[in-house]
Image (tube, rainbow, N blue to C red):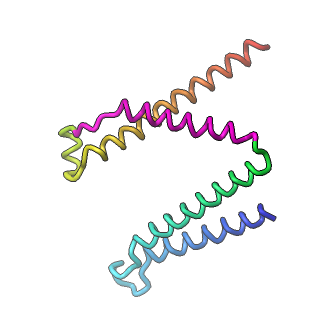
Amino acid sequence: MLNKGLQIFMAVSISIGLLLALLTVMDFTDSVCADCWPFENLIAYSYILVAVLVLVALSGAGMSLMKKPESLKMMVIGIGSTAILFGISFGMSSGEITPNLAALSGELSESTVKMADTGLIAMYITMCLSICVIVFSSVMKIVRR
């Protein structure tokens, strides 16, 4: 039942998204698309979808915890390790605005650059850890044979 509801929700969400995308780029008066729907409608719809999906994810986690309370330990470990990862990334990032970066956009602040650096460094660390885990598991599989 829940799976069928999710399929219906996904189909409706995709249909609304496609309709908004078409209304954003199409004009039905054969003129230049000056009177098309504003692009902000599509962005607002994206925000609504993200909010709904976050609520669904949190409720799914809550239902899972009710069924199996011992899974809380693994959830706390995952959240804690993610917080540590972003803490390390934030510590490694710099908020320096280089001349090349300043030439791209004149309205950059140090905090914006620092958060962008934090996200990039976290992605690099996660990518390196993923590659190491894949190599390690492959080597262990070969050694066990």
52 or 32: which is nearer to us? 52
Q: Does 26 sit above or below residue 14?
A: below
Residue 72, position in %: x, y? Answer: 69, 41
Residue 48, position in %: x, y? Answer: 52, 67
- 66 part of magenta stretch: no
129 or 69: which is nearer to us? 69
Compared across the picture, whether 123 is left or right of 66 comes to left
Residue 3, position in %: x, y? Answer: 77, 61
Q: Does 14 sit above or below residue 116?
A: below
Residue 85, position in %: x, y? Answer: 49, 33
Picture quarter with the C terminus: top right
| Residue 79 picture quarter | top right
100 or 64: which is nearer to us? 64
Q: Does 9 sit above or below residue 75?
A: below
Identify which residue is drawn at 64% across, 71% down.
12
Question: Magenta region: which residues?
Answer: 70-97
* Predominant secondary structure, magenta span: helix
Identify which residue is drawn at 44% across, 74% down.
24
Identify which residue is drawn at 73% across, 41% down.
71
Compared across the picture, whether 123 is left or right of 9 comes to left
Q: Does 28 sit above or below residue 113?
A: below
Identify which residue is drawn at 76% across, 51% down.
66
Compared across the picture, whether 77 is left or right of 64 comes to left
